[in-house]
Structures are given as structure tokens and as C-alpha cells.
Image: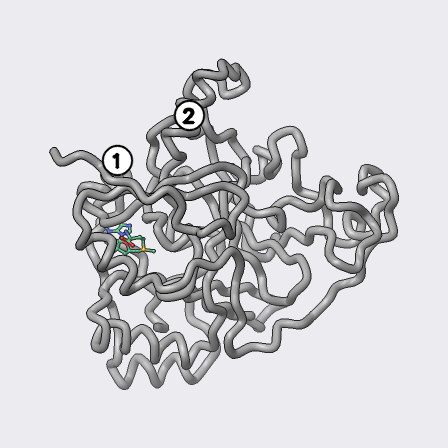
Amino acid sequence: MSTNKIIKNITEGIENYSIRLLYQEESQVEDLRRQHIKYVRNNVSVSLDSDFYYDGCDCTDNCESSECGCKSTHGYFYNSQISGLDPNLVQSSNATFNHTIYECNSLCACSNQCQNRLVQHGISLPLEIFRTSLCGWGVRVSSSYTNNQRNNQEKDVDDQVVIKQGQFVCEYAGEIIKTDEARRRWRSYKSDYGITDNYIFCIREHIGKDRVLRTNIDPTRVGNIGRYINHSCSPNLRMFLVRVNSIVPIAALFATREIRENEELSFDYSGQIGMGIEDEKINNNEEDSVSKNGIIVGERKPCFCGSENCCGYLPFDESL
Ligand SMILES: C[S@@+](CC[C@H](N)C(=O)[O-])C[C@H]1O[C@@H](n2cnc3c(N)ncnc32)[C@H](O)[C@@H]1O
């Protein structure tokens, strides 16, 4: 097996931690650079007006009290000991995309150290992109980080546990686009660029009985580390929606269990919490016309996650 070459930091300093890329052939990096042309830390709104601010709180105690206006209005889901979500919530089968987490925002009086500010601070540890055997690029915690910890004998990591259950890992960030544009791009990526991997992620939030708020995130060309994370039918990450200064949600990935050194990071592309694939019908004529036009219906790729309960195919959003 050929040895790995390394790009030390593909983010060019945009993230708090470096993200390295391990590769074998120069052509692999050339292909990647042709597709992923710009690394961004957060979502970029191309076609939507995203300026929308929620009320802020006026806390001066870093929002430790339950009187905090943000907490009492929207709830509080974090556990500051693990820089993440309450373990019960990441495991809960009831958690849905309607379970939005509202962090303190730019209108709040609290400081940056407030316990209700987490995802807005960015990735929580150095990650690395590596070549998997069957799924192209994948992501795991950087081995240089785990070696350092071993050398420093930081027992906090509980031997080789590198991510704690509930810990925030990273966002799935890219361009926020309208649905028509998402469909246009998906077709054009295939025909004009030969890109057959799907990176466009469609989130549906159910509001009330019959309203659905749809957010399309496209990190294909402009995106962050999230675009390299593969699907698994038994994933170790789970997506929750977080809002900070905008109506556009942040798709944030949290660990569903302890993750050990060298384990590949994964999440379930179907969301299992309301993202909805083909079994969900939105009351929207547009959806029907796409199916009738036969543009893209039922494109399912085989899943190579290798888990015992693998359902055989990657989830695919039929409305694309
Ligand atoms: C969001 S990208 C993930 C990163 C991708 N592996 C890459 O090389 O850039 C999604 C694509 O990765 C591949 N992929 C992700 N998870 C997979 C799985 N469990 N089995 C097979 N292919 C997978 C599929 O081609 C899919 O369209």
C-alpha cells in the first residue's frame, strides 16, 4: 500500500483547528480541487435574504440562570461539561428537526463564554480527510491530535476515546440555495462536471400542521469539512438544527456515542429525524411536476457502510 502524503491544512486558517488531507496520488488532490473550489466555515446565502434576528437576552452571568430570556423562550439543550448536547437528547428517538436549538446571538448581552454559545464557535477538534476503501474521501479525528494527547498523557481522553457522546463536531455548511436552483445544479453537476457524488442536502422542518420550511445546503463547490463525511446506516454523528443570527438553520453534527481513535465519522443522510426522503410527500405541486418530467427519480446508489443493519442503498432526496 502506498504511503500517505499530507496537506497540513486545507482550510487555510479559516477554522479554529487545522484540517489535514491524507492522499496517495497528486491526481486525487487535483480532482478534489476541481470540485471543491472554496473552503468556507459557515453557510453562505447565495439566493436568500438571511438577515433575520431573534430577540437577545440581557444576562450578565453567562446565561447560567434559568431566567435567561433565550433559555426560557427556546429551551436549553447543551451540556457545558462536554461542549455538546445532553446525551439523552442525542440518543432520543423523539428528537426532530422541529427541536431547533437557539443559541445566544449578536443581540444578547452575554459574553462569548456564555454556555449557550457552542456551534457558533466552530469545529471542536482537528479533523482529517482520508481516502476510504469504498466511499471516496471520508473524515476522522486527526491522528496527530491523538498522538499529541498520548504524549501529553491527557487522561481526559479515556484511552482512545477522542470524541465524547453528545460532543459537537462540525457543521454541514455550504451555499444555501432555493429548490429550483438545487435541482438545476444537481443536473448540471452531473452533465457539466461529471460529479456523481451528491452533496446537496435538503432539510425540511415541519411548522404547524401543513407548512414545511425547506432549506437546501450545497457544499459541492463552496463548503466545509461536512461535505467529506460519509453516510452510515449505523452512524456515530447526528444532525440537529441550530439557529444563531439567522432564520437559515445551521446543520450541526453531534456525536451519538463515544468515538474512538481512527473511527470514521458518519451520519445518516436520511436524517431519520424529519429530513424526509421519498416516503414524505410535501404539499407542493412543484414536486409532482418534477416527477412527471422524469428528471431525476429514484436514483439510488449502493451503500457500502458495512454495518449490520445496512439498508443497501444511500438515501436520496427524490425531490431533487
Ligand atoms: C457528501 S459526499 C461524502 C464525501 C465523498 N465520499 C467524497 O469523496 O467527497 C456523498 C457521496 O459520498 C459517497 N458515499 C457516502 N457515503 C457512502 C456510503 N455509505 N456508501 C457508498 N458511497 C457513499 C457517495 O458517492 C455520495 O454521493
| Viewer-closest of 91 and 166 | 166
Q: Identify the residue shown where x is 45% and y is 27%.
A: 162
C-beta proximity under 8 Å, tags 1 and 2: no
In the rendered image, the vertical position of residue 132 relative to residue 163, given as above or below: below
Residue 281, disc: none
| Quadrant into which the C terminus falls | bottom left
**Whether residue 278 is visible:** no
Which residue matches tag 1? 308
Q: Is residue 245 left or right of residue 13?
A: right
Q: Position of residue 199 (x, y in %)?
A: 35, 61
> Local crowd at mark 1 within 10 Å, few (<14), some, or many (≥20)?
few
Q: Is residue 102 left or right of residue 127?
A: right
Q: Identify the residue shown where x is 44% and y is 16%.
A: 151
Instruction: Please state which amino acid type lies under the numbered disc 2.
Output: Thr
Q: Identify the residue shown where x is 21% and y is 58%.
A: 301
Q: Position of residue 169 (x, y in %)?
A: 50, 41
Which residue matches tag 2? 146
> Local crowd at mark 2 within 10 Å, few (<14), some, or many (≥20)?
many
In the rendered image, the vertical position of residue 84 relative to residue 30, given as above or below: above
- Mark 2: which secondary structure? helix
Q: Quadrant of residue 63?
A: top right
Q: Is residue 149 left or right of residue 311?
A: right
| Quadrant into which the N terminus falls | top left
Q: Quadrant of residue 242?
A: bottom right
| Viewer-closest of 99 and 40 | 40
**Whether residue 135 is visible:** yes
